[in-house]
Image (cartoon, rainbow, N blue to C red):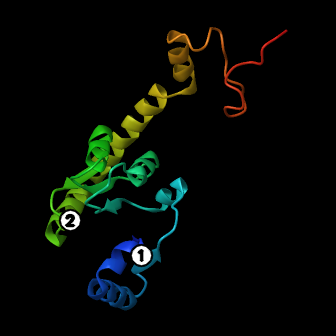
Amino acid sequence: MTLDIWGDDILGKNRAYADEIRKSAKRSAGMVKLMGTRKLQSSDFENYDFLLHNAEKEPFGRAIIEALGNSCPCVVHDSGEPPRIVKRFNGGTIFALATPEAICTAVTSLIESYASIKTQLALKLSETQQEFSSENSLRSLQRLGILSAPHTIPSEKFRDIAPAPTA
């Protein structure tokens, strides 16, 4: 098992904590990696068993959405948007206090119910993909009167939603 820690900004706030994390990473024989700050790609989540997101102030939760969208369960802090996203997708566990004990309990809970969470997440993702499919989106636009029927989606991914007008 390896632990990848992303984000230098958190480590930069508390020098003693950051130094201890760096020392622990060096002693771990490659099991703990400090990844630094970089923009994650959605496909990066395919390489992880779960995402631990311990930010206490997260207004949106883009990383959570991308992780769940790649069938990667999440352990999140109970503030902001992440817990609502995790609940909607049945995609992980939530902890109330950002203490090592609370995080450990939440991770343990996720591990104990990992197979069930992965199954529920796959089902919810399938439902969501159908709900937000191109065809359903077009039908919604037609019901709202934004597009007139019939419209089809070209084979190339969203090149043109509607056919070109004819003279």
Report the side of 138 relative to 26 (left or right).
Answer: right
The mark closer to the camera, 1 or 2, is: 1
Quadrant of res 153: top right
Q: Position of residue 100 (x, y in %)?
A: 18, 71
Residue 27 to residue 104: above or below: below
Name which residue lies at 43% across and 84% down: 30
Tell me the residue that label 2 is attached to: 103
Q: Position of residue 70 (x, y in %)?
A: 46, 49
Q: Is residue 77 left or right of residue 32?
A: left
**Chain-order first, disc 1 or disc 2:** 1
Amino acid carrying label 1: it is Asp
Q: What x and y, as percent, mark residue 2?
A: 39, 74
Q: Which residue is mark 1?
A: 8
Residue 76 image-quadrant placement: bottom left
> Residue 144's spot in the image, x, y percent?
50, 12
10 Å crowding of disc 2: few (<14), some (14-19), many (20+):
many
Q: Are marks 1 and 2 in contact (CB under 8 Å)?
A: no
Q: Quadrant of the C terminus?
A: top right
